[in-house]
Amino acid sequence: MSEGFWRRLSIFAGLIAVAAIFGLMVFVANLEIKDLDIWLHIGMGRHIVLNNFLVPQADILSCTITGKPWINHEWLFQVIVYEVFSRWGVSGLIQMQIALVVLTTLLLLLMGYNSQKQLTSILLLLLVTIVYQGRFTNRPDLFSLLFFAAYIYILSFYISQHWSVYALFVIQILWTNIHGFFFFGPLFVMIGLASEWLKRHARLPYEWNQVGRLTDEEYRRLRMIFGLVILACFLNPCGFRGAWYPLKVFFQISGESKVFFENILELQRPMALSNIFDIGRFPYYKLLIMLSAMSLFFNRRKIDISGLMVWGVFLLFSLAAIRNMIFFAFAAYLVFVTNAMTVSLNDLVPFKIQDMRFVHIVSIVVKVAIFLWIFQYGMNLTLNGYYDQETLEWKSEFGGISQKSVPVRAVDFLVENKVRGNFFNGFNTGAYLVGRCYPDIRVFIDGRTEVYGPRFFNFYRDLWENPTAEELRRTLKRYQITGILIHSHKHPPPKALLRAVQGHPDFVPVYFDDDGIIYLKDIPRQRQLIEKFRIDFKNWQPYRMDLMQAGYKRIPPSRNISRAEMLYGLGLDQAALSEARQAVRVSPTYAEPYKILGQILAKRQECELAYENLRLATMMDPEDHKIRMKFAEMVLKSGQPHLAAKHYEKIITKWPDYRKAYYELVKLFIREGRIGPAVKILRQAPQTRTDDQAAMIEIADLLIEVGAWEAARFVLKEIPAYENNAEITSRLGRVIKMLESQRSGG
């Protein structure tokens, strides 16, 4: 067969692969609504629409920062999602998500598609799609990515057209009122102007001065566009303050705002020196960095400096936070396909290929392989899902609302009973409360980190994670809190918080299930509700799954597990035991119920039963170091110190940064009189932190008891800021006196 036949067949195979990519995108973009912030946007959009499109200039959603200035640069997105949701519900939001994703990807395809270099376009588009998949969620970012692609497309291909000026002006107005990343628009134009100035006035290497150089008319038009898009940034409800606000936030990143980047997953760095070569962590993002860098190297003589500058800027931007990776992916795609236009296959391989039929056949095979990979990838995604504990039916992760990320039933309770007031809530539930309950309920905190600020976030985090009863009471009184919602999401709520709330005399539990617990303050307007729904935990009856309905399906007992964990956190051991036993009844192959049973039985000094349950938990989940520690403790209590020491040593080997294992092993050695090995282990432990103070004092006291004064002095001096602690300095003074006494006696 002729070369032409194989070339046409190769192009056809490529088009099939492109269609598969778009099919995959449509399927994956049908992801269920699981983003938390969408509910805040819907609630705020409802407020704006119902108040004649007046955008508040200060906070109105919370009970903690009410009246604090708020530059709501996403107001137009909020109006859009509210209108879509009010007309077409959840399915409408998902369809909008699909439409934005497909339109954005279509622009990328138009930018990079070349029938002569079809395979290159397909491979890069597929890599970008997989990175893009992580942002398939109804957030203003989707519009930012669409505008990002539109800017690149127009500036790259249509700068010579007069309409490009007006198109970018309109896009910039929309972008300014939809998402805070709107400053990318002027940044693109500024990069274009800077690169053109360099091409005209600086001596650049190789052929850089001529590659992608604009005509005088195009250069003039680019300057006009820059002025207009800067003007468009001021066309927002807050004027100059709205235009400047995203940059103001950006410049604060290195200060107190670091706390957000440390505690919020999507704001953490995608790479560090410790994981830069970890192929299991964001492999497609790293591959895009490598491929785009290689394309710059192979095309180094004909680089378009504007593309190089965009690549560098967005690489640095992406290294700052996980959520920024997709913006670099778009930039990497642009740079790679641009460089690929001028790099031939013969530039990459060490020998010259004469038979083009061979090239086309190899290309067909690779494109078919890509199609099959996409098909298999999509099929694997169809398996993602979970059991809906209400219906005992499998819930796909595609379509509808996630039943795992938000407290649907708990908030249903608030809505159905028309609960009003100020609520204390967790960071991850504030947005959902706003979307469902505003203005009846005002939240303690929600996802608007830049509005609350780092100081308030730190205050909230300390209160949430480890409050004292007095701290919680002062806070609830200060903000006139009348209700508390503690959501059980992924991890059980902190025990200190649960017990502080449970011990508050004015708050009564009225709702409890696997998705959370609600307390209402005992005030006149809520007394009737409290009398109707008050929960008596002393006579708690566990949730019993209908096993006849469940049949032989292996349904995870997540409702029982979640409730058992919260009851255990509340200090209601008997109720927690009953829920954990129900979980074992439903499915005896999950580790969590055995962990709870083991810990409660250990607390009751029922060592043999505790050991048996912790053994099962450890066998089922050997990666849980806390349970391994509990297991070692039970071995020790059973009178097997040497065996317990081996377990502690295994934990240290597997988790060398887990300081508690070192401390327990040290205490064990001291009790056995093995002072030398104890000190040696302590020297090997990670650097002591402030929260290790109690453990270190206990170790020092054990050493003092056996007269190991030198070792005790070493331990006390290892405690951070020991000089400022009277309790520690008193012990240290006594130890030093004993050492001096020993020396003088000697």
Image (cartoon, rainbow, N blue to C red):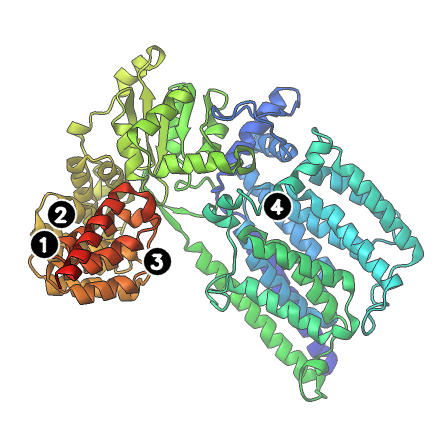
Q: Position of residue 636 (x, y in %)?
A: 11, 57
Pointers 4 and 1 in contact (C-beta within 8 Å) = no
Which numbered circle lies on residue 602?
2
**Residue located beneath label 3 in the image:** 687
- Quarter holding the N terminus? bottom right
Secondary structure of residue under mark 3? loop
Q: Is residue 331 left or right of residue 365?
A: right
Q: Is residue 727 above or below residue 86?
A: below
Q: Is residue 733 left or right of residue 145?
A: left
The nearer-to-camera label among 1 and 2 is 1
Rounded to the nearest whole Å, what is the CA distance between mark 4 and mark 3?
Answer: 43 Å
Q: Is residue 692 above or below residue 110?
A: above
Going from N to C along the chain, the mark reached first, 4 or 3, is: 4
The residue nearer to you, when weighing 187 against 78, is 187
Rounded to the nearest whole Å, what is the CA distance between mark 2 and mark 3?
Answer: 30 Å
Secondary structure of residue under mark 4? helix
Q: Position of residue 529 (x, y in %)?
A: 31, 16
The residue nearer to you, when weighing 33 against 447, is 447
- Quarter holding the C terminus? bottom left
The structure residue drawn at horizontal position 35% and vertical position 48%, both measured from the top left corner, is: 721
Q: In the rendered structure, which amino acid carries the disc numbered 1?
A: Lys
The structure residue drawn at horizontal position 41% and vertical position 53%, both measured from the top left corner, is: 384
